[in-house]
Image: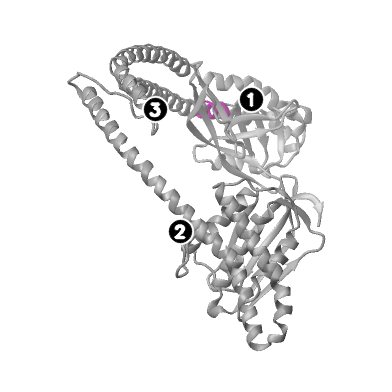
Amino acid sequence: MSFRTRILIGFAAVVLVPLAVFGLRVRAEMASRLTAEYQRRVATLAAVIRADLARGAVDIARRLAALSAAIADDNRFRQAALEGGDRRYLLDYAGAAMRSAGLSLLQIQDEQGRIVSSGHFRNEYDRLEPALPRLVAASQSGIALVRVRTAEAPLLAIARVDSVRLGTKRFTVVGGLAVDSAFLVGLSPDSELSVSVVLPGDSVAQPGTEAAVVSEVSLPFVLETDSAATLRPARIVVSHSLASLVALRHGVDLAFLAAVVLAGAIALLLGSWMSLRISRPLTALARKTAEIDVDRLDVAFESDRADEIGALTRLLAAMTERLRAGAARLREAERRIAIGDLARQVNHDIKNGLTPIRNVFRHLAETAANDPDRLAAVYRERQRNVESSISYLEILAANYARLYPEPAATACDVGQVIRDTIARLGTTGPVELRTEMAERLPLVRADQLVLRRILENLVGNAVDSLAHGAGTVTVSAATGAPADGRATVRLIVADTGKGMTKAELDRAFDGFYSTKPGGTGLGLSIVRRLVLDANGVLRVETQPGAGTRFIIDLPADGGRA
């Protein structure tokens, strides 16, 4: 992030953060106060609803008392109810009485709970419903919500119970007022307030952005089930519309957004002006500093300013002068290191080429001492190894004469290279060299000399890693998994030696790192470079005490050996 950007962000933060805190605080305070006001209004309405229900209960009780007195004075009803006289008059009585009393529900039952007359549903005559008046009378407030059947649809009403004695029999009168949409509208004079009834088992609709449930009024409800009827609490839920609060918030948000945009623009303009005053000399200094390179240290830093930028310019000038002197010393050191590396690599490769010759002469010396008659035959057997090693040294000499020759990539037989290399190296003491090669291996496009150097280094390291100079080194070749759509040949050099720790494995391919006394530390670094030159992949699997496996995947040429 540039210095100018930091200044702009700083100015924007200084201006916008306090403005944002102020705006959010105003918005939260406004919402809090309006919500508190709405809660007070809802609480007031809930108290009014409780008072209205109490007055309604008294009114229903007054009307039922008047109906009970009228029933007691009506001899025709008495005769029909006690002596079974005019049945039609009895059936129609409750309907006429309900309408004259201004009720929505009226039911007259005898002592057994049998309906004698029903005003809201005439066909309920002679039906047993003893639980209804009993549960309504048992409610604590004396009134309860009931749901009864009518000819059109079920009716929800607030009901009370009264009774009248005719002769030796007592009749129960259940009456009430309907709780319908008109009743609920009458409870809510404010358009932003809404009232709804929630019966047991119903769920309250969660308010969206337009309303919120804030208060409830409890009322007992007669719940009829298949087995019995019980009293359960019902709720009259009062909710307030938040449309005005939402609209007010929207207006405040727009005004706050406009203030933020204006303040942000002013902050950016002021910050841009100040950043230009500061960043221009720094940008020029940075441009000159970017021109500095190891091969270009002639950049001049000059300034007559007395401030921090002038001090920085003079510091860079002194640093550049020190870099010039250091670069000269570095080039000389690199030249000496390169000569030393080349000498060590030449020494290492020559030692690898002399090893087969040494083994042949040891074999000839042992034959001359033990069986002189076979000396000529043994010499003819091993003559090819000596000549091959001498040819190898000659090619190395020619390559080093060119410092770094391009490898001659040709199609070569990996199996034949392995056999020739093992034959040249021979066996030393109790060390056993094994080869495991699959049939019909694909040819590999690589330099045979490169493959030989890779194998000689890996096999030599494997032999050196064997504990007490005894063990097995196995060189195997097989067709590997395809890579990038091309077939591969996998070479594995495995030993039963001491293996490597994680720390040793991390440094195994570092130049001049060796765990062998007198070792140069170049073998594995040379192997890795040669594998990369052959477009191959090198991996190592090792574990302390369990030996080491070097795995090389080389791209196939396409033909078969």
Which residue in the protein does label 2 denote? 512
Residues in magenta? 57-64
Q: Amino acid at mark 1?
A: Ser
Using a 10 Å C-alpha cutoff, classify the residue at mark 2 as few (fewer than 14 neighbours), some (14 to 19) or many (20 or more).
some
**Outermost residue, bottom direction?**
370
Which residue in the protein does label 3 denote? 1
Instruction: Find numbered disc 1 in the image and state the secondary structure of the residue it sits on.
Output: loop
> In this rendering, would 6 be left or right of 401?
left
Q: Amino acid at mark 2?
A: Phe
Mark nearer the N terminus (1 vs 3): 3
Which of label 1 and label 3 is nearer to you?
3
Measured from the top left, where is residue 19 in percent x and y? 33, 19
Q: How is the image coloured?
A: one colour
**Outermost residue, left direction?**
306
Residue 181 visible in this rendered orientation of the protein: yes
Using a 10 Å C-alpha cutoff, classify the residue at mark 1 as few (fewer than 14 neighbours), some (14 to 19) or many (20 or more).
many
Instruction: Find numbered disc 2 in the image and state the secondary structure of the residue it sits on.
Output: loop
Determine the main secondary structure of the stretch shown in magenta.
helix
> In this rendering, would 430 be left or right of 237?
right
Foreground of the two, 483 or 155: 483
Which residue in the protein does label 1 denote? 104
